[in-house]
Image (cartoon, rainbow, N blue to C red):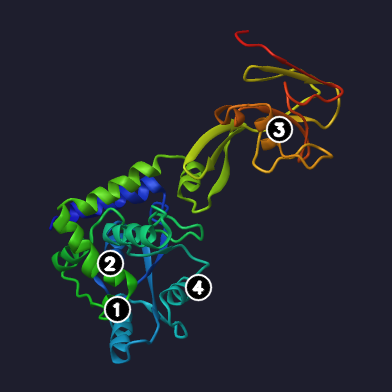
């Protein structure tokens, strides 16, 4: 094990993601396992000012007591009482409830990333993974490393570590024990391929990635610059956001639209739109006018608030001028 090369990979990840300020303070959440022990030692070796915190859930009797003792004596960790949780979600919430006034780091690795991707795919259909930096500021400096590498690092550095016997009984333990080995038999690069798929997805803007990952059948997100992405089940399209009328002519595709009336905007059709003062849906207006479905998402509507005032070329309104200028 080339520990210097491992440290370089960790530092590159930390700097690229701006996880910890150079030479800054960070509190490692440690369990006594190889991952968090590697985290604690590696960040110290890289020159960060490292402290440690161990949350004792007290679920495994003497084994939990031994983990707490190990973290206190070997990693100089502050040990806090984290009893009260039973489910994995409850234990996670308790664990992250401590030291919220400090920058915290966890020892999640690429192996945890693969397990998380598989878990979320199976339970929610969302191909998402562990974030390098959570919204609450918790950071993951070891995501470039595999679990086998943290164990090898500890051995090379002469660091003892514990193995949590309760891991196999968790949902992620099931993935680790049965599903990941089966995937390796299917293809030796299965884990790396799962990571690559996540990395390729991460090149999308966060808003667009959220749109694609959402389990909702219908959703729209703002991409900025007046552009919105809209998904209706398996169909995806882009549309411009509302444009105000009254300050000049609006060009919308093949249409020129103008009005001196105040409070009017031009935007695309949205499911559920109705004509102002009427019960008729815009979808039915399109059907009656024999507008192909492929054209409806880009057809302009003139609206006041949420009410549709005019549908250019189909439904006119006093004070609104609309002209189709094909080829102009």
Q: Are dots 2 and 3 in contact, CB under 8 Å?
A: no
Q: Secondary structure at mark 1?
A: helix
- Given this view, does label 2 or label 3 mark the residue nearer the observer? 3
Q: Are there few (<14), some (14-19), or many (20+) residues within 10 Å of tag 3?
A: some
Q: Is 87 left or right of 239, judged from the image as shown?
A: left
The answer to the question of whether label 4 and label 3 lie on touching residues, with beta carbons closer than 8 A, is no
- Mark sitting on residue 169: 1
261 left or right, relative to 153? right
Q: CA distance from mark 4 to mark 3?
A: 54 Å
Q: Nearer the viewer, residue 238 or 100?
A: 238
Secondary structure at numbered mark 2: helix
For residue 272, above or below residue 177:
above
For label 1, the crowd category at 10 Å Cα-Cα, with few meaning under 14, some 14 to 19 and many 20 or more, is few
Q: CA distance from mark 3 to mark 1?
A: 58 Å
Q: Give the secondary structure at mark 3.
A: helix
Q: Quadrant of the N terminus?
A: bottom left
Say whether disc 4 or disc 3 marks the residue closer to the N-terminus: 4
Residue 97 disc label: 4
């Amino acid at each position: 094990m080339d520990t210097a090369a491992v440290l370089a990979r960790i530092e590159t990840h930390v700097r690229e993601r701006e996880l910890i300020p150079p030479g800054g303070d960070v509190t490692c959440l440690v369990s006594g396992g190889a991952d968090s022990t590697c985290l604690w030692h590696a960040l110290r070796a890289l020159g960060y000012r490292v402290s440690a915190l161990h949350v004792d859930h007290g679920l495994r009797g003497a084994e939990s007591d031994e983990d707490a003792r190990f973290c206190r004596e070997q990693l100089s960790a502050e040990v806090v009482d984290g009893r009260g949780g039973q489910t994995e979600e409850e234990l996670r919430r308790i664990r992250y409830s401590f030291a919220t006034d400090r920058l915290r780091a966890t020892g999640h690795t690429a192996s945890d990333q693969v397990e998380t991707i598989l878990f979320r795919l199976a339970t929610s259909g969302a191909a998402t993974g562990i974030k390098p930096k959570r919204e609450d500021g918790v950071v993951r400096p070891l995501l470039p490393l595999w679990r086998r590498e943290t164990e090898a690092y500890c051995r090379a550095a002469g660091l003892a570590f514990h193995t949590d016997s309760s891991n196999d009984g968790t949902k992620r333990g099931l993935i680790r024990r049965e599903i990941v080995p089966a995937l390796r038999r299917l293809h030796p690069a299965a884990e790396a391929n799962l990571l690559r798929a996540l990395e390729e997805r991460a090149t999308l803007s966060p808003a667009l990635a959220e749109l694609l990952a959402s389990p909702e059948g219908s959703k729209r997100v703002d991409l900025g610059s007046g552009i919105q992405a809209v998904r209706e089940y398996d169909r995806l399209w882009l549309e411009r956001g509302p444009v105000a009328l009254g300050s000049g002519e609006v060009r919308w595709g093949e249409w020129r639209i103008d009005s001196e009336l105040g409070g009017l905007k031009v935007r695309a059709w949205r499911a559920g739109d109705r004509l102002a003062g009427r019960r008729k849906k815009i979808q039915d207006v399109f059907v009656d006018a024999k507008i192909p479905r492929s054209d409806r998402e880009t057809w302009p509507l003139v609206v006041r608030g949420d009410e549709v005032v005019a549908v250019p070329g189909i439904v006119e309104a006093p004070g609104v001028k609309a002209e189709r200028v094909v080829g102009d």
